[in-house]
Amino acid sequence: MTSLPALTEPAAAEGRSAVLGMKRGVRRRCPHCGEGALFMGYLKVRPICPACGHDNGHYRADDGPAYFTILLVGHLVVAPLLALSFLWSFPPLLIVALGLPLVGAATLAALPFIKGAWIGVLWGTGASAGDEGLTDR
């Protein structure tokens, strides 16, 4: 078993920001170093970064990524379907048969990227899991 590098204490001098964390997270990389993989599969967060040893397991994503995914897909897929009036002349079952897989695929495709960005923002702002302590600094 290989040993992980020692954890370094993040400091303001490192340039920790929500934007930097979001950029690294949307690439599904560790928000601390930008190198290690953030997920062990589709959505399972890797508890410890294999590259820098940062504890990514304490950032709770909960319902935030799902909410923003639904918001994004709703605006990018459903709104144009409602705005394009020529679609209203098609049979409703055809619209449902074509629309549901489109919405489902768009949602499943966007969710890991949005969850990564969410965890990156949590890292950048210093928020973490816990009832009392909302900082990891």
Image (cartoon, grey):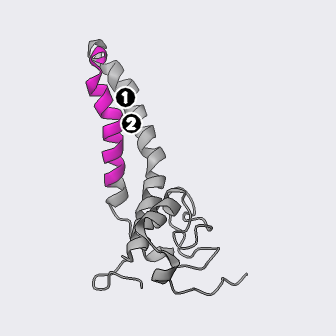
Q: Magenta span covers which residues? A: 67-87
Predominant secondary structure, magenta span: helix
Numbered label tally: 2
Q: Name the quadrant of the C terminus.
A: bottom left
Residue at the outermost front position: 13
Q: Nearer the viewer, residue 115 or 9?
A: 9
On the image, the x and y values in percent for residue 98 come to: 40, 25
**Which of 117 and 70 lies nearest the eye of the viewer?**
117
Q: Is residue 23 magenta?
A: no
| Element type where label 2 sits in the image | helix
Up the image or down, 20 lies above or below 127; here it is above
Was residue 76 drawn as part of the magenta stretch in this picture? yes
In the picture, the disc for residue 103 is 2
Q: Residue 100's image quarter?
A: top left
Of 14 and 84, the residue lying toward us: 14
Image quarter in which the N terminus is found: bottom right
